[in-house]
Amino acid sequence: MADSFRIEQDSMGSIKVPTDVLWGAQTQRSLENFSISGDSMPHEIIHALALIKKAAAITNERLGKLNPTQKNLIIKAASQIAEGMHDNHFPLKVWQTGSGTQTNMNVNEVISNLACLECGEELGSNKPIHPNDDVNKSQSTNDIFPSAIHIAVTISLEKKLLPELQLLIESFDKKSKDWNGIIKIGRTHLQDAVPLTLGQEVSAWRDQVATAAKRIRSSLSELYPLAIGGTAVGTGLNAPPNFDIEIIKELSVLTGISFATANNKFAVMASHDGLVNAMSQLRMLAVSLLKIVNDIRLLASGPRAGFAELNLPQNEPGSSIMPGKVNPTQCEAMAMVCTQVIGLDAAVAIAGSGGHLQMNVYKPLIGFNLLQSIDLLTTACECCREKMIENMEPNHKNIQYHLDQSLMLVTALTPEIGYVNASKIAHHAYTNDISLRDAAMELDYINIDKFDQIINPSKMV
Protein backbone atom coordinates (compact mmCIF):
# COMPACT_ATOMS: atom_id res chain seq x y z
CA MET A 1 0.00 0.00 0.00
CA ALA A 2 2.92 2.34 0.70
CA ASP A 3 3.89 2.12 -2.97
CA SER A 4 0.49 3.46 -4.09
CA PHE A 5 1.52 6.97 -3.12
CA ARG A 6 4.46 9.23 -3.74
CA ILE A 7 5.44 12.04 -1.38
CA GLU A 8 5.50 15.51 -2.95
CA GLN A 9 6.58 18.83 -1.51
CA ASP A 10 5.13 22.30 -1.97
CA SER A 11 5.36 25.55 -0.02
CA MET A 12 3.06 24.12 2.66
CA GLY A 13 5.01 20.91 3.23
CA SER A 14 4.61 17.24 2.27
CA ILE A 15 1.53 15.52 0.88
CA LYS A 16 0.72 12.07 -0.49
CA VAL A 17 -0.11 11.96 -4.21
CA PRO A 18 -1.29 8.76 -5.96
CA THR A 19 1.61 7.24 -7.87
CA ASP A 20 -0.25 6.84 -11.18
CA VAL A 21 -1.46 10.44 -11.64
CA LEU A 22 0.21 13.32 -13.45
CA TRP A 23 -0.92 16.05 -11.09
CA GLY A 24 1.08 17.20 -8.09
CA ALA A 25 0.88 18.55 -4.57
CA GLN A 26 -1.27 21.63 -5.09
CA THR A 27 -3.81 19.72 -7.16
CA GLN A 28 -3.96 17.04 -4.48
CA ARG A 29 -4.58 19.64 -1.76
CA SER A 30 -7.46 21.06 -3.75
CA LEU A 31 -8.96 17.61 -4.25
CA GLU A 32 -8.89 17.01 -0.51
CA ASN A 33 -10.16 20.45 0.49
CA PHE A 34 -12.89 21.00 -2.11
CA SER A 35 -14.89 17.83 -2.53
CA ILE A 36 -18.00 19.75 -3.52
CA SER A 37 -20.55 18.16 -5.90
CA GLY A 38 -19.66 16.42 -9.15
CA ASP A 39 -19.12 19.59 -11.18
CA SER A 40 -15.62 19.29 -12.62
CA MET A 41 -13.79 22.15 -14.28
CA PRO A 42 -14.87 22.16 -17.95
CA HIS A 43 -12.35 20.56 -20.29
CA GLU A 44 -12.72 23.56 -22.60
CA ILE A 45 -11.05 25.72 -19.94
CA ILE A 46 -8.30 23.12 -19.39
CA HIS A 47 -7.60 22.98 -23.12
CA ALA A 48 -7.56 26.79 -23.35
CA LEU A 49 -5.09 26.96 -20.45
CA ALA A 50 -2.89 24.45 -22.27
CA LEU A 51 -2.92 26.65 -25.37
CA ILE A 52 -1.84 29.59 -23.21
CA LYS A 53 1.01 27.53 -21.72
CA LYS A 54 2.12 26.56 -25.21
CA ALA A 55 2.03 30.15 -26.44
CA ALA A 56 3.77 31.34 -23.28
CA ALA A 57 6.61 28.85 -23.77
CA ILE A 58 7.16 30.02 -27.34
CA THR A 59 7.08 33.66 -26.25
CA ASN A 60 9.29 33.19 -23.21
CA GLU A 61 11.94 31.42 -25.28
CA ARG A 62 11.79 34.17 -27.91
CA LEU A 63 12.27 36.80 -25.19
CA GLY A 64 15.18 34.90 -23.62
CA LYS A 65 13.35 33.57 -20.55
CA LEU A 66 13.41 29.85 -21.44
CA ASN A 67 15.93 27.75 -23.31
CA PRO A 68 14.88 25.82 -26.45
CA THR A 69 14.80 22.47 -24.63
CA GLN A 70 12.44 23.80 -21.98
CA LYS A 71 10.27 25.40 -24.62
CA ASN A 72 9.97 22.20 -26.64
CA LEU A 73 9.13 20.06 -23.60
CA ILE A 74 6.35 22.46 -22.56
CA ILE A 75 5.03 22.69 -26.12
CA LYS A 76 4.81 18.92 -26.47
CA ALA A 77 3.05 18.41 -23.15
CA ALA A 78 0.71 21.38 -23.60
CA SER A 79 -0.22 20.25 -27.11
CA GLN A 80 -1.23 16.83 -25.82
CA ILE A 81 -3.38 18.42 -23.11
CA ALA A 82 -5.02 20.82 -25.56
CA GLU A 83 -5.93 17.82 -27.76
CA GLY A 84 -7.66 16.13 -24.81
CA MET A 85 -5.14 13.30 -24.40
CA HIS A 86 -4.89 13.69 -20.62
CA ASP A 87 -8.37 14.86 -19.60
CA ASN A 88 -8.57 12.31 -16.76
CA HIS A 89 -5.70 14.08 -14.99
CA PHE A 90 -7.73 17.25 -14.39
CA PRO A 91 -10.10 16.21 -11.60
CA LEU A 92 -10.66 19.50 -9.78
CA LYS A 93 -14.11 20.88 -9.06
CA VAL A 94 -15.60 24.14 -10.23
CA TRP A 95 -16.25 25.04 -6.59
CA GLN A 96 -12.72 25.88 -5.52
CA THR A 97 -10.76 29.09 -5.15
CA GLY A 98 -12.53 31.92 -6.97
CA SER A 99 -9.42 32.80 -8.94
CA GLY A 100 -9.00 29.35 -10.47
CA THR A 101 -5.45 29.12 -9.09
CA GLN A 102 -5.74 25.44 -8.26
CA THR A 103 -6.77 24.55 -11.81
CA ASN A 104 -3.96 26.68 -13.21
CA MET A 105 -1.54 24.75 -10.99
CA ASN A 106 -3.17 21.48 -12.05
CA VAL A 107 -2.21 22.31 -15.65
CA ASN A 108 1.27 23.46 -14.63
CA GLU A 109 1.88 20.26 -12.64
CA VAL A 110 0.67 17.94 -15.39
CA ILE A 111 2.88 19.67 -17.94
CA SER A 112 5.85 19.40 -15.55
CA ASN A 113 5.24 15.70 -14.96
CA LEU A 114 4.79 14.96 -18.67
CA ALA A 115 8.20 16.56 -19.14
CA CYS A 116 9.52 14.33 -16.34
CA LEU A 117 8.26 11.25 -18.18
CA GLU A 118 9.72 12.48 -21.44
CA CYS A 119 13.16 12.88 -19.84
CA GLY A 120 13.10 9.73 -17.69
CA GLU A 121 12.83 11.62 -14.40
CA GLU A 122 10.61 10.70 -11.45
CA LEU A 123 7.11 12.15 -11.28
CA GLY A 124 7.02 15.10 -8.92
CA SER A 125 10.74 15.80 -9.26
CA ASN A 126 10.03 19.02 -11.20
CA LYS A 127 12.98 18.16 -13.44
CA PRO A 128 13.74 19.50 -15.97
CA ILE A 129 10.57 21.67 -15.95
CA HIS A 130 9.28 23.36 -12.79
CA PRO A 131 5.50 24.03 -12.69
CA ASN A 132 5.86 27.55 -11.26
CA ASP A 133 9.24 28.73 -12.46
CA ASP A 134 8.99 27.43 -16.03
CA VAL A 135 5.44 26.49 -17.06
CA ASN A 136 3.93 29.50 -15.26
CA LYS A 137 6.74 31.89 -16.22
CA SER A 138 5.59 35.49 -16.96
CA GLN A 139 2.06 34.58 -15.86
CA SER A 140 -0.33 34.75 -12.93
CA THR A 141 -3.57 32.86 -12.51
CA ASN A 142 -5.20 36.28 -12.27
CA ASP A 143 -4.48 37.10 -15.90
CA ILE A 144 -4.41 33.72 -17.60
CA PHE A 145 -7.46 32.08 -16.01
CA PRO A 146 -9.91 34.76 -17.21
CA SER A 147 -8.09 34.73 -20.54
CA ALA A 148 -8.67 30.97 -20.74
CA ILE A 149 -12.38 31.53 -20.11
CA HIS A 150 -12.45 34.12 -22.91
CA ILE A 151 -10.69 31.71 -25.26
CA ALA A 152 -12.88 28.72 -24.34
CA VAL A 153 -16.12 30.70 -24.62
CA THR A 154 -15.10 32.33 -27.91
CA ILE A 155 -14.17 28.98 -29.48
CA SER A 156 -17.41 27.40 -28.24
CA LEU A 157 -19.52 30.25 -29.59
CA GLU A 158 -17.80 30.48 -32.95
CA LYS A 159 -17.44 26.76 -33.62
CA LYS A 160 -20.47 25.27 -31.87
CA LEU A 161 -23.40 27.55 -31.08
CA LEU A 162 -23.32 30.05 -33.95
CA PRO A 163 -23.04 27.37 -36.68
CA GLU A 164 -26.00 25.50 -35.14
CA LEU A 165 -28.04 28.70 -34.96
CA GLN A 166 -27.37 29.24 -38.66
CA LEU A 167 -28.77 25.79 -39.42
CA LEU A 168 -31.83 26.58 -37.30
CA ILE A 169 -32.32 29.88 -39.13
CA GLU A 170 -32.11 28.09 -42.48
CA SER A 171 -34.65 25.48 -41.34
CA PHE A 172 -37.15 28.16 -40.32
CA ASP A 173 -36.45 30.07 -43.52
CA LYS A 174 -37.32 27.04 -45.64
CA LYS A 175 -40.56 26.50 -43.75
CA SER A 176 -41.40 30.19 -44.09
CA LYS A 177 -40.97 30.10 -47.86
CA ASP A 178 -42.73 26.76 -48.28
CA TRP A 179 -45.71 27.91 -46.20
CA ASN A 180 -46.04 31.49 -47.40
CA GLY A 181 -49.16 30.67 -49.42
CA ILE A 182 -51.04 29.14 -46.47
CA ILE A 183 -53.42 31.76 -45.10
CA LYS A 184 -54.44 31.32 -41.47
CA ILE A 185 -55.99 33.25 -38.65
CA GLY A 186 -53.75 35.36 -36.45
CA ARG A 187 -54.13 35.49 -32.71
CA THR A 188 -53.46 38.26 -30.21
CA HIS A 189 -54.16 37.87 -26.46
CA LEU A 190 -54.84 34.22 -27.44
CA GLN A 191 -58.00 35.52 -29.15
CA ASP A 192 -58.84 35.54 -32.85
CA ALA A 193 -57.24 38.35 -34.84
CA VAL A 194 -56.79 39.29 -38.50
CA PRO A 195 -55.21 36.78 -40.89
CA LEU A 196 -51.60 36.27 -41.91
CA THR A 197 -49.79 33.47 -43.69
CA LEU A 198 -48.21 30.57 -41.89
CA GLY A 199 -45.00 31.56 -43.64
CA GLN A 200 -45.21 35.03 -42.12
CA GLU A 201 -45.74 33.50 -38.69
CA VAL A 202 -42.66 31.30 -39.06
CA SER A 203 -40.63 34.23 -40.42
CA ALA A 204 -40.95 35.83 -36.99
CA TRP A 205 -39.29 32.80 -35.41
CA ARG A 206 -36.54 32.82 -38.04
CA ASP A 207 -35.73 36.46 -37.47
CA GLN A 208 -35.86 36.15 -33.68
CA VAL A 209 -33.12 33.53 -33.87
CA ALA A 210 -31.19 35.56 -36.46
CA THR A 211 -31.30 38.65 -34.23
CA ALA A 212 -30.19 36.61 -31.21
CA ALA A 213 -27.26 35.23 -33.23
CA LYS A 214 -26.33 38.76 -34.28
CA ARG A 215 -26.31 39.88 -30.65
CA ILE A 216 -24.07 36.94 -29.72
CA ARG A 217 -21.64 37.78 -32.54
CA SER A 218 -21.56 41.36 -31.33
CA SER A 219 -20.67 40.23 -27.81
CA LEU A 220 -17.53 38.54 -29.16
CA SER A 221 -15.92 41.95 -29.60
CA GLU A 222 -15.56 42.13 -25.80
CA LEU A 223 -14.14 38.60 -25.59
CA TYR A 224 -11.26 39.04 -28.03
CA PRO A 225 -9.23 41.38 -25.75
CA LEU A 226 -7.33 39.27 -23.20
CA ALA A 227 -5.84 40.07 -19.81
CA ILE A 228 -2.66 38.08 -20.50
CA GLY A 229 0.42 40.06 -19.56
CA GLY A 230 -1.22 41.77 -16.58
CA THR A 231 0.07 39.06 -14.21
CA ALA A 232 -1.12 39.59 -10.61
CA VAL A 233 -3.01 42.91 -10.61
CA GLY A 234 -2.64 44.31 -14.12
CA THR A 235 0.80 45.93 -13.89
CA GLY A 236 2.63 43.10 -15.66
CA LEU A 237 5.04 42.45 -12.79
CA ASN A 238 7.50 39.59 -13.59
CA ALA A 239 6.56 39.56 -17.27
CA PRO A 240 9.19 40.78 -19.79
CA PRO A 241 8.47 43.81 -22.01
CA ASN A 242 6.14 43.06 -24.93
CA PHE A 243 5.22 39.66 -23.49
CA ASP A 244 1.51 40.48 -23.82
CA ILE A 245 1.79 41.49 -27.47
CA GLU A 246 3.94 38.51 -28.43
CA ILE A 247 1.85 35.86 -26.67
CA ILE A 248 -1.35 37.21 -28.20
CA LYS A 249 0.19 36.75 -31.65
CA GLU A 250 0.94 33.12 -30.83
CA LEU A 251 -2.54 32.47 -29.42
CA SER A 252 -4.16 33.96 -32.51
CA VAL A 253 -2.14 31.59 -34.69
CA LEU A 254 -2.91 28.57 -32.48
CA THR A 255 -6.66 29.23 -32.35
CA GLY A 256 -7.26 30.84 -35.72
CA ILE A 257 -9.06 33.65 -33.87
CA SER A 258 -7.82 37.24 -33.81
CA PHE A 259 -7.40 37.84 -30.10
CA ALA A 260 -5.97 41.14 -28.86
CA THR A 261 -4.22 42.46 -25.79
CA ALA A 262 -6.62 44.38 -23.56
CA ASN A 263 -6.06 48.14 -23.58
CA ASN A 264 -6.65 48.31 -19.84
CA LYS A 265 -5.69 45.13 -18.07
CA PHE A 266 -6.80 46.51 -14.71
CA ALA A 267 -10.37 46.68 -16.04
CA VAL A 268 -10.54 43.19 -17.53
CA MET A 269 -8.92 41.59 -14.46
CA ALA A 270 -10.86 43.40 -11.74
CA SER A 271 -14.17 42.75 -13.50
CA HIS A 272 -15.50 40.45 -16.18
CA ASP A 273 -18.14 42.61 -17.84
CA GLY A 274 -17.43 41.15 -21.29
CA LEU A 275 -18.24 37.66 -20.03
CA VAL A 276 -21.35 38.93 -18.23
CA ASN A 277 -22.46 40.57 -21.48
CA ALA A 278 -21.90 37.37 -23.47
CA MET A 279 -23.96 35.44 -20.91
CA SER A 280 -26.74 38.02 -21.17
CA GLN A 281 -26.89 37.41 -24.93
CA LEU A 282 -27.24 33.68 -24.29
CA ARG A 283 -30.12 34.56 -21.97
CA MET A 284 -31.71 36.61 -24.76
CA LEU A 285 -31.40 33.64 -27.11
CA ALA A 286 -33.05 31.47 -24.45
CA VAL A 287 -35.88 34.01 -24.11
CA SER A 288 -36.45 33.92 -27.88
CA LEU A 289 -36.31 30.13 -28.13
CA LEU A 290 -38.70 29.75 -25.20
CA LYS A 291 -41.22 32.00 -26.92
CA ILE A 292 -40.83 30.07 -30.18
CA VAL A 293 -41.37 26.61 -28.72
CA ASN A 294 -44.32 27.89 -26.70
CA ASP A 295 -45.85 29.12 -29.96
CA ILE A 296 -45.22 25.77 -31.60
CA ARG A 297 -46.78 23.73 -28.82
CA LEU A 298 -49.82 26.02 -28.79
CA LEU A 299 -50.27 25.67 -32.54
CA ALA A 300 -49.83 21.90 -32.21
CA SER A 301 -52.21 21.56 -29.25
CA GLY A 302 -54.91 18.96 -29.66
CA PRO A 303 -55.18 16.87 -31.70
CA ARG A 304 -58.94 17.43 -31.41
CA ALA A 305 -59.49 19.85 -28.53
CA GLY A 306 -56.83 22.44 -29.36
CA PHE A 307 -55.62 24.57 -32.27
CA ALA A 308 -54.07 21.57 -34.05
CA GLU A 309 -52.74 23.76 -36.86
CA LEU A 310 -49.31 22.10 -36.81
CA ASN A 311 -48.64 18.38 -36.88
CA LEU A 312 -45.45 17.54 -35.00
CA PRO A 313 -43.42 14.35 -35.57
CA GLN A 314 -44.60 11.51 -33.38
CA ASN A 315 -41.30 10.41 -31.89
CA GLU A 316 -42.34 8.54 -28.74
CA PRO A 317 -45.41 7.67 -26.62
CA GLY A 318 -46.52 10.54 -24.42
CA SER A 319 -48.31 8.85 -21.57
CA SER A 320 -47.93 5.79 -19.37
CA ILE A 321 -51.70 5.60 -18.88
CA MET A 322 -53.36 7.19 -21.93
CA PRO A 323 -52.87 5.02 -25.04
CA GLY A 324 -52.07 6.86 -28.26
CA LYS A 325 -51.16 10.14 -26.57
CA VAL A 326 -48.23 12.01 -28.12
CA ASN A 327 -46.79 15.13 -26.50
CA PRO A 328 -44.68 18.08 -27.79
CA THR A 329 -41.64 16.76 -25.96
CA GLN A 330 -39.02 18.62 -28.00
CA CYS A 331 -40.74 21.86 -27.04
CA GLU A 332 -40.72 20.82 -23.40
CA ALA A 333 -37.04 19.88 -23.43
CA MET A 334 -36.14 23.19 -25.05
CA ALA A 335 -38.29 25.07 -22.54
CA MET A 336 -36.42 23.46 -19.65
CA VAL A 337 -33.05 24.26 -21.25
CA CYS A 338 -34.05 27.89 -21.75
CA THR A 339 -35.29 28.18 -18.18
CA GLN A 340 -32.00 26.75 -16.91
CA VAL A 341 -29.96 29.20 -19.02
CA ILE A 342 -31.98 32.14 -17.72
CA GLY A 343 -31.16 30.99 -14.18
CA LEU A 344 -27.47 30.54 -15.01
CA ASP A 345 -27.42 34.08 -16.35
CA ALA A 346 -28.71 35.41 -13.04
CA ALA A 347 -25.82 33.69 -11.26
CA VAL A 348 -23.27 35.13 -13.71
CA ALA A 349 -24.69 38.63 -13.26
CA ILE A 350 -24.32 38.37 -9.49
CA ALA A 351 -20.84 36.89 -9.90
CA GLY A 352 -19.80 39.68 -12.24
CA SER A 353 -20.76 42.25 -9.63
CA GLY A 354 -18.79 40.42 -6.95
CA GLY A 355 -15.31 41.65 -7.70
CA HIS A 356 -13.38 43.55 -5.02
CA LEU A 357 -10.71 46.05 -5.99
CA GLN A 358 -8.27 44.29 -8.37
CA MET A 359 -9.84 40.82 -8.26
CA ASN A 360 -13.07 39.02 -9.09
CA VAL A 361 -13.27 35.74 -7.22
CA TYR A 362 -16.15 34.12 -9.13
CA LYS A 363 -14.14 33.12 -12.17
CA PRO A 364 -14.82 29.35 -12.15
CA LEU A 365 -18.57 29.91 -11.76
CA ILE A 366 -18.63 32.41 -14.64
CA GLY A 367 -16.72 30.09 -16.95
CA PHE A 368 -18.72 27.03 -15.94
CA ASN A 369 -22.11 28.70 -16.43
CA LEU A 370 -21.18 30.20 -19.79
CA LEU A 371 -19.84 26.95 -21.21
CA GLN A 372 -22.73 24.93 -19.79
CA SER A 373 -25.19 27.39 -21.36
CA ILE A 374 -23.47 27.20 -24.75
CA ASP A 375 -23.52 23.41 -24.65
CA LEU A 376 -27.17 23.27 -23.53
CA LEU A 377 -28.34 25.72 -26.19
CA THR A 378 -26.28 24.14 -28.97
CA THR A 379 -27.42 20.60 -28.35
CA ALA A 380 -31.03 21.61 -27.62
CA CYS A 381 -31.24 23.57 -30.88
CA GLU A 382 -29.77 20.65 -32.82
CA CYS A 383 -32.17 18.18 -31.23
CA CYS A 384 -35.20 20.43 -31.67
CA ARG A 385 -34.30 21.16 -35.28
CA GLU A 386 -33.62 17.57 -36.32
CA LYS A 387 -36.36 15.84 -34.32
CA MET A 388 -39.17 18.38 -34.70
CA ILE A 389 -38.79 21.54 -36.77
CA GLU A 390 -37.53 19.98 -39.98
CA ASN A 391 -40.40 17.48 -40.00
CA MET A 392 -43.37 19.44 -38.64
CA GLU A 393 -46.17 20.01 -41.14
CA PRO A 394 -49.26 22.24 -41.39
CA ASN A 395 -52.73 20.82 -40.74
CA HIS A 396 -54.46 22.41 -43.73
CA LYS A 397 -57.94 21.30 -42.69
CA ASN A 398 -57.85 22.94 -39.25
CA ILE A 399 -56.09 26.04 -40.54
CA GLN A 400 -58.86 26.59 -43.10
CA TYR A 401 -61.60 25.84 -40.58
CA HIS A 402 -60.30 28.39 -38.07
CA LEU A 403 -59.89 30.97 -40.82
CA ASP A 404 -63.45 30.46 -42.05
CA GLN A 405 -64.86 30.70 -38.53
CA SER A 406 -63.04 33.84 -37.51
CA LEU A 407 -65.07 36.96 -36.74
CA MET A 408 -62.04 39.24 -36.95
CA LEU A 409 -62.13 39.23 -40.74
CA VAL A 410 -64.70 41.94 -40.18
CA THR A 411 -61.78 44.30 -39.50
CA ALA A 412 -61.39 44.78 -43.26
CA LEU A 413 -64.89 46.35 -43.39
CA THR A 414 -63.98 49.19 -41.03
CA PRO A 415 -62.71 51.61 -43.71
CA GLU A 416 -65.94 51.02 -45.68
CA ILE A 417 -68.67 51.08 -43.01
CA GLY A 418 -66.90 52.33 -39.88
CA TYR A 419 -65.76 50.69 -36.65
CA VAL A 420 -69.19 50.80 -34.94
CA ASN A 421 -71.13 49.11 -37.74
CA ALA A 422 -68.37 46.54 -38.32
CA SER A 423 -68.45 45.77 -34.59
CA LYS A 424 -72.23 45.26 -34.72
CA ILE A 425 -71.82 42.75 -37.56
CA ALA A 426 -69.25 40.81 -35.54
CA HIS A 427 -71.38 40.76 -32.38
CA HIS A 428 -74.49 39.78 -34.34
CA ALA A 429 -72.63 36.89 -35.98
CA TYR A 430 -71.25 35.71 -32.64
CA THR A 431 -74.53 36.02 -30.71
CA ASN A 432 -76.55 34.20 -33.36
CA ASP A 433 -73.85 31.68 -34.30
CA ILE A 434 -73.93 32.63 -37.94
CA SER A 435 -71.27 33.66 -40.45
CA LEU A 436 -70.11 37.24 -40.92
CA ARG A 437 -71.62 37.21 -44.39
CA ASP A 438 -75.03 36.20 -43.08
CA ALA A 439 -74.79 38.80 -40.31
CA ALA A 440 -73.92 41.50 -42.83
CA MET A 441 -76.92 40.51 -44.96
CA GLU A 442 -79.30 40.57 -42.00
CA LEU A 443 -78.11 43.96 -40.73
CA ASP A 444 -77.88 45.38 -44.28
CA TYR A 445 -74.89 47.64 -43.48
CA ILE A 446 -73.13 46.82 -46.75
CA ASN A 447 -73.91 45.54 -50.20
CA ILE A 448 -73.24 41.82 -50.27
CA ASP A 449 -71.16 42.01 -53.46
CA LYS A 450 -69.03 44.66 -51.80
CA PHE A 451 -68.76 42.45 -48.73
CA ASP A 452 -67.47 39.53 -50.83
CA GLN A 453 -64.99 41.82 -52.51
CA ILE A 454 -63.59 43.16 -49.22
CA ILE A 455 -63.70 40.04 -47.05
CA ASN A 456 -60.99 38.21 -48.94
CA PRO A 457 -58.29 36.81 -46.64
CA SER A 458 -55.73 36.62 -49.44
CA LYS A 459 -55.92 40.42 -49.78
CA MET A 460 -55.54 40.96 -46.03
CA VAL A 461 -52.11 39.35 -45.68
Image (cartoon, rainbow, N blue to C red):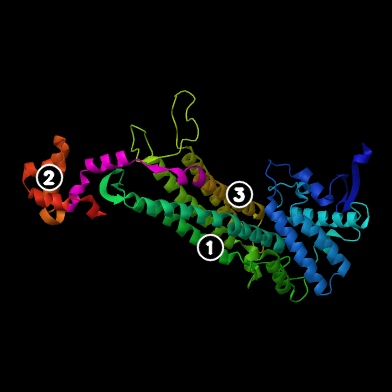
Percent across and percent down for residue 160 are: 59, 55
Residue at (42, 57) in percent of width and height: 207
Q: Is residue 139 left or right of residue 70?
A: left
Magenta stretch bounds: 385-412
Residue at (63, 71) in percent of width and height: 264
Q: Which residue is most to the left? A: 444
Circle 2 residue = 424
Q: Residues within 10 Å of mark 3 (few under 14, many from 20)?
A: some
* Residue 382 lies in the magenta stretch: no
First of labels 2, 1 by sequence position? 1
* Residue 80 appearing in the image: yes
The alpha-carbon separation of the residues under discs 3 and 1 comes to: 18 Å
| Looking at the image, residue 300 lies above or below residue 421 | above
User: Amino acid under label 3?
Assistant: Gln
The alpha-carbon separation of the residues under discs 2 and 1 comes to: 51 Å
Disc ID at residue 372: 3
Residue at (85, 57) in percent of width and height: 112
Residue 116: image quadrant is bottom right
First of labels 3, 2 by sequence position? 3
Q: Compare residues 47 and 312 and report the one nearer the observer.
A: 312
Circle 1 residue = 217
Percent across and percent down for residue 243 are: 75, 73
Disc 1 secondary structure class: helix
Q: Is residue 88 left or right of residue 150?
A: right
Instruction: Assign the C terminus to one quadrant of the image.
Output: bottom left
* Residue 420 appearing in the image: no
First of labels 3, 1 by sequence position? 1
User: Amino acid under label 1?
Assistant: Arg
Q: Residues within 10 Å of mark 1 (few under 14, many from 20)?
A: some
